[in-house]
Structure formats: C-alpha cells, structure tokens
Image (cartoon, rainbow, N blue to C red):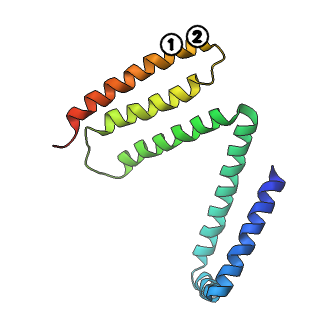
Amino acid sequence: KEQMMFASNLMAAGWVVVLILFTGELSSALSLIVKEPMIGWQLLLQSLAQYLSVSFYLALVQRFGGVVAVCVTSCRKILTICISFVVFSKPFSNLYIPTGLLALIGISLSVVAKQKHPASRDVVFLQAAGVVMFFMFVSMWFMPK
C-alpha cells in the first residue's frame, strides 16, 4: 500500500516539476516561498494531510471493503455540507431537506445491496424505492415556480 502511494506520488511530482520547469513557474514559486515562508509550511501540511487521508481510505477499503469505504466518504461529504451551513451563512431552501434525505436513502440502499440475504434485500429495496418516489413527489411542491 505505502509503496504504491510512494511510487504514484513520486511519478506525479516528477511530472509537476517538469511542467513547472517548462512553463517557467518554478523560479516564481520558489521566490514566493522564500518571501512568504508560511506558504511553504501550508503546502507541507496540506501534503501530509492528503497522504494521511489516502492512507486511511486505503486501510478502510482493505479492512472493510469498497462499499463501506464509499459509504463512509459519502457520509463525510454530507456532514461537511451540514457543517458548512452552520459555519457559513447562506439562505435556506426547502429543497435541501428532501435532497438530503434522498442522499441518505442512496447511501442506505448501497449498504442494503451488499446484504447476504436476497429476500430481505428485495423487500428493503422496494420500501426504499417507495420512499424515494414519495420524496420526489413531495419535492415537486417545493420547486420554485
């Protein structure tokens, strides 16, 4: 896992260096980092955070499988959107509620699809499909006219 990440990141970094050498942006980038050292530290911290996030994601896939990893990342994205409503003020639309519920139903359906018992999976799928249809019908009332 770590060897694959190291090799792919090394190859990508090589291509980026070649590209910025070709375009002439390397000298201006280095002079900016010398002038503003905080930018260099921020780039380093961002690189470390990305490495850790990819490592955790690959460990999640290896231990629990791809479906669980996709569900976790989908829930993380939904949580990020919810937190953005708290941190950054924006006008609220009634469409956010059925849309958020549809996203949660989609995540639930992907988990149900991996169940080992086909009979219970079909029943839950039909129930979820009914809920999705209901929310789609209800959300038409909230659409701007």
Residue 97 position, x and y percent, is 32, 34
| Quadrant of the drawing holding the C terminus | top left
Residue at the spot of label 1: 123
* Rendered position, 61 above or below 135: below
Q: Residue at position x 76%, y 38% from top?
A: 62
Residue toward you, 34 or 129: 129
* Rendered position, 27 above or below 66: below
Give, as a three-letter code, the residue at label 2. Ala
* Rendered position, 122 above or below 102: above
Furthest residue to the right?
Answer: 3
Disc 2, disc 1: CB below 8 Å? yes
Q: Residue at position x 38%, y 50% from top?
A: 87
Give, as a three-letter code, the residue at label 1. Val
Furthest residue to the left?
Answer: 145
| Mark 1 surroundings within 10 Å by alpha-carbon count, few (fewer than 14), some (14 through 19), many (20 or more) | few
Residue 109 position, x and y percent, is 52, 26
In the figure, is residue 78 to the left or right of 8? left
Residue toward you, 44 or 133: 133
Give the Cα separation between the discs numbered 2 and 1.
6 Å
Furthest residue to the top?
Answer: 119
Q: Secondary structure at mark 2?
A: helix
Residue 101 position, x and y percent, is 39, 31
Residue at the spot of label 2: 119
Q: Secondary structure at mark 1?
A: helix
